[in-house]
Image: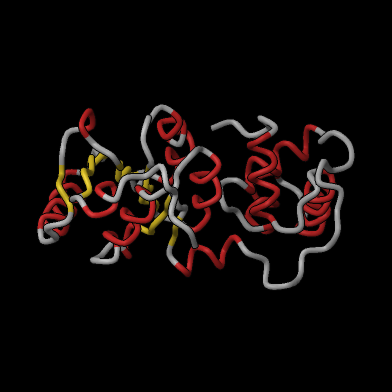
């Protein structure tokens, strides 16, 4: 790894100015107490911050719609999410780091430091949810064909982290038919995993946030 010569050393050694962006008073109090224990972190207002620690909230039904907030934050952001299914949407919306709400701890300092330095970081457990365990097969990166209306419904439900069975229940179709549509979505989006399909669908504007 090489250091960007345009970044002054002070940008790495000075205390990190962090803005806490959350509507949860309990999380704010907990994070404030945690970060205050580290002298290399200063909690400041949003206007004077270098890095934002943004909370997606605990209401899963609103999490995806709130992702648009990330696009309006004009600094590197570490997103705190409640579910593995929200990792890809957070990164696609512009987060530079992602951590699970129940795993926020002393290690958050390392994440904030890395993000301020221009890196993208996340917990190992979260990273494994984005990386396929098997070698990625060769596919057309642009996919093949347009999604049908049913496939658009399926990819929307995929973005909510639903399994094939739950997709089938939601759409009133059989598990086999749900699996057929999921495979069709992945083929047309040129994806080898469900997460890749969600990210590509977001890039194409097929998912409503």
User: Considering depth in this image, is 119 or 139 the residue closer to the camera?
Assistant: 119
Q: Position of residue 71 (x, y in %)?
A: 45, 30
Which residue occupies 70% across, 48% down? Answer: 197
User: How many numbered callouts?
Assistant: 0
State the colouring used for the structure image.
Answer: secondary structure
Say left or right for 201 vs 176. left
Asked where in the image residue 100 lies, by quadrant, the reply is bottom left
Q: From what the image shows, is residue 57 above or below residue 75? A: below
Q: Position of residue 56 (x, y in %)?
A: 37, 43
Which residue occupies 23% across, 66% down? Answer: 106
Say left or right for 164 vs 56. right
Q: Position of residue 32 (x, y in %)?
A: 14, 51
Which residue occupies 15% across, 59% down? Answer: 34
Q: Position of residue 126 (x, y in %)?
A: 49, 63
Q: From what the image shows, is residue 49 above or below residue 187? A: above
User: Considering depth in this image, is 49 or 123 the residue closer to the camera?
Assistant: 49
Q: Residue furthest right?
A: 144
User: Considering depth in this image, is 105 or 18 the residue closer to the camera?
Assistant: 18
Say left or right for 173 vs 128. right
Asked where in the image residue 135 lies, by quadrant, the reply is bottom right
Which residue occupies 78% across, 37% down? Answer: 150
């Amino acid at each position: 790894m090489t250091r960007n010569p345009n970044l002054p050393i002070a940008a790495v050694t000075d205390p990190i100015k962090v803005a806490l962006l959350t509507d949860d008073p309990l999380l704010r109090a907990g994070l404030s107490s945690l970060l205050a224990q580290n002298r290399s972190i200063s909690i400041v207002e949003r206007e004077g911050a270098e890095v934002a620690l943004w909370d997606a909230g605990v209401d899963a039904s609103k999490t995806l719609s709130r992702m648009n907030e990330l696009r309006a934050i004009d600094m590197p952001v570490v997103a705190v999410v409640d579910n593995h299914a929200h990792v890809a949407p957070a990164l696609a919306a512009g987060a530079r780091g992602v951590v699970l709400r129940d795993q926020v701890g002393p290690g958050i300092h390392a994440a904030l430091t890395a993000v301020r330095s221009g890196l993208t970081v996340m917990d190992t457990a979260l990273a494994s949810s984005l990386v396929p365990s098997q070698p990625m097969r060769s596919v057309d990166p642009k996919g093949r064909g347009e999604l049908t209306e049913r496939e658009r419904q399926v990819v929307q439900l995929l973005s909510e982290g639903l399994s094939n069975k739950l997709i089938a229940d939601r759409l009133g179709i059989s598990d086999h038919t749900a699996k057929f549509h999921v495979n069709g979505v992945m083929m047309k989006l040129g994806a080898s995993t469900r997460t890749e399909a969600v990210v590509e669908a977001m890039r194409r504007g097929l998912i409503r946030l």
